[in-house]
Image (cartoon, grey):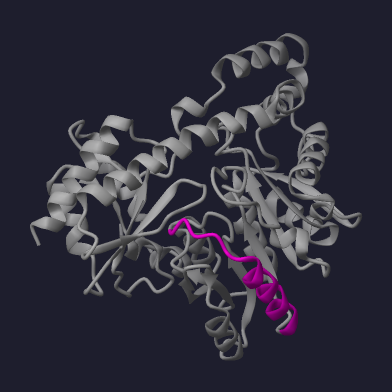
Amino acid sequence: MEYKFSEKIANLKPSAIREIFKSLTDPSIISFAAGNPSPESFPVEDLARFAAEIFANESTTALQYNITEGYTPLRQAIAERQKKRFGESMVREDDSVLVVSGGQQGIELACKTFCNEGDAIICENPSFIGSLNSFRSCGATPVGVPMEIDGISLTALEETLKNTPNAKLMYLIPTFHNPTGITMSLEKRLGVLELAKKYDLVIIEDNPYGELRFAGEDLPNLKALDTDGRVIYCSSFSKILSAGMRVGFVVANSTICSKMTVAKQGEDVHTNIFFQMLCHKFMTNCDLDAHIAKINALYRRKCNLMLECLDKYVPSDKVEFTRPEGGLFIWGIVKDTDDASNIVKLAIEKKVAVVPGTAFNCDTEAKSNAFRLNYSTPSDEQIVEGVKRLGEVFKSL
């Protein structure tokens, strides 16, 4: 039969990242295309021990339905952790914590809560493909604003806001941005909040990488700077415990969280309770700061190795790379072109995979002169060999 898909789904394109994964069954391909945490970061022994304790002593709670808002001890631990790590203003008296099935669900629920069909969401351009597709699937339109070396262009942002009267939300990744690795300056964080207030927009602050700082100084999150209750803060345990657990969380004004909770009930009732309990056990029985410090030491070494290899093997007159202070990604900007798609194809021919910049464009028809590299997943040997192959691609042009 001929299937008649909804307009929301019919025009969605598959994630370029997920499609690239399908080509990685060839073991000879070195992948810089993933966004996964390193397997070395998983605290397997501790999680195995806590899992056994849960099934031995709390099996009914772990296997039964629970409240949509999330496992109460975990929500309390998250609130305490956020205040300890990022400041008391991260969780104010009129805020709540909502546990979600991965940080991306929090982003999608925020869109569903605030946007009607045809509304616009102002985003950095480029931006995270998973969120962009979530917005599109809800019937909202991502509208891109150019990035600068210290974050979103405030001049372009205000111009876009003036010309987009149907904008309902801003979606931003201020810290260790995906895909560019850029961190927004304090000046721009304050400027973004000022513009959001001026044009009366709610901000989704996506911060899955905020704990992964291995250089530079911490900057306050937008949520910590917000005094109007207009920031919805989304984060997760994916990058510090396990991506496969799919445990994320939202911190926002209680009124917003209540509406997002109702929206979540129609999706999955509640996030996996066993994994929520496992996260809580780790948070309250282990030294989470020490665990994260080990991850950051690992990523510092791997990022520095990749940057050293890029400097050594890739001609600097042909491509420029960002220098992240944390997170998982490096962004390569190809000079003297507006379309780097051929670079991505040539790299695959050399058995090295990178993600084309077009995957992160708000405008799906636009070209990109950039590509994304990941250093957390490949081994040190793969980083060296893969960058050598990438250098051969540029030298052959």
Please state, as top left, top right, bottom left or bottom right, where the C terminus lies in the image: bottom left
Against 323, residue 62 (above or below) is above
| Picture mark count | 0
Frontmost residue, 301 versus 126? 301
The quadrant in which residue 245 appears is top right
Q: Position of residue 356 (x, y in %)?
A: 30, 59
Task: Read off the magenta span.
Answer: 180-198
Against 155, residue 41 (above or below) is above
Asked if the stretch drawn in magenta spans residue 194, the answer is: yes
Please state, as top left, top right, bottom left or bottom right, where the N terminus lies in the image: bottom left
Residue at figure coordinates x 77%, y 11% from the top left: 57
Q: Is residue 99 left or right of residue 145?
A: right
Q: Position of residue 248 (x, y in %)?
A: 64, 43
Q: Is residue 174 left or right of residue 319?
A: right
Q: Position of residue 393 (x, y in %)?
A: 14, 53
Against 386, residue 63 (above or below) is above
* Main secondary structure along the magenta-highlighted residues: helix
Asked if the stretch drawn in magenta spans residue 349, the answer is: no
Q: Is residue 140 visible?
A: no
Q: Is residue 315 left or right of residue 284?
A: left
Residue at figure coordinates x 47%, y 67% from the top left: 8
Residue at figure coordinates x 56%, y 88% from the top left: 159
The quadrant in which residue 101 appears is top right
Against 198, residue 83 (above or below) is above
